[in-house]
Amino acid sequence: MSALLIGLTGGIGSGKTTVANLFADRGIELIDADLIAREVVAPGSDGLAAIVDHFGSGVLDEEGQLDRAALRQRVFHDDQELAWLNALIHPLVRTTMVERGRQARSAYALLVIPLLIENGLQSLVERVVVVDLPETEQIRRTMARDDNSRSLVENIMANQASRQQRLDGADDRIDNSGDLADLTQQVDTLHQQYLTLARNHDSDNGI
């Protein structure tokens, strides 16, 4: 049962998924905020029931699942409705992430949270590791990966924390501007540090 929670974050195109998978290859359980955000509004969930009660059945598709496009239309130009939705979803996601992390069987658990800095979630974890990349490289990689225009990628980045804000909120930094071998070495180094932290954490808590 894992007690040490590490938060992994980074901007669009920084390589969060690649880094998370490298930790997973070393036996570390991943808790993905994006997957949990979908889970807490799945059919039969309390989250979806609350959304339907508030917005009506028009936010459901023919199969009874959340129609995200329809929901976006309801909240896109209405700050009050968006605030209501965030006040519902965010606590559900936070609670579920922490519970899953505490139940993890690996030495520590990695909480993958793209908007960790933006949503002020540093208090959920013992350490924050940021996958870092120069912004010009973020743009280049994202355009190549998603076939998006530069203006679209820049717009997405403008609505995320800046590179400096992420670095200011980080305890650890992974530089993803090099090759896979360099990235792997950095993950190995941090993994060993986190294993030591986990042992000390367990000892301090009498585990």
Image (cartoon, helix red, strand yellow):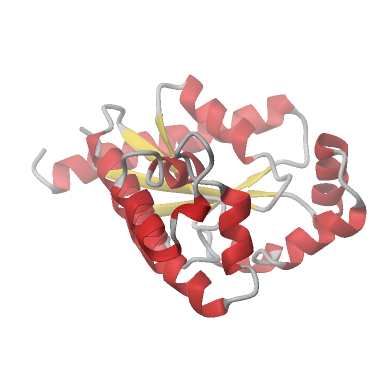
Residue 201: give x, y in percent of width and height. Answer: 23, 45
Q: What number of labels is visible?
A: 0
Residue 39: give x, y in percent of width and height. Answer: 40, 40
Q: Is residue 87 above or below residue 95?
A: below
Q: Nearer the viewer, residue 133 or 38?
A: 38
Q: Is residue 138 above or below residue 30?
A: below
176 on left or right of 22: right
Q: At 56% across and 78% down in the image, what residue appears? A: 79
Residue 179 in sight in this render: yes
Q: At 40% across and 22% down in the image, what residue appears? A: 27
| Residue 121 found in image quarter | bottom left
In the rendered image, the residue lying farthest to the bottom is: 80
92 on left or right of 10: left
Q: At 46% across and 42% down in the image, what residue appears? A: 38
Q: Quadrant of the N terminus?
A: top left
202 on left or right of 171: left
Q: At 45% across and 53% down in the image, what residue appears? A: 57
Residue 207: give x, y in percent of width and height. Answer: 11, 38
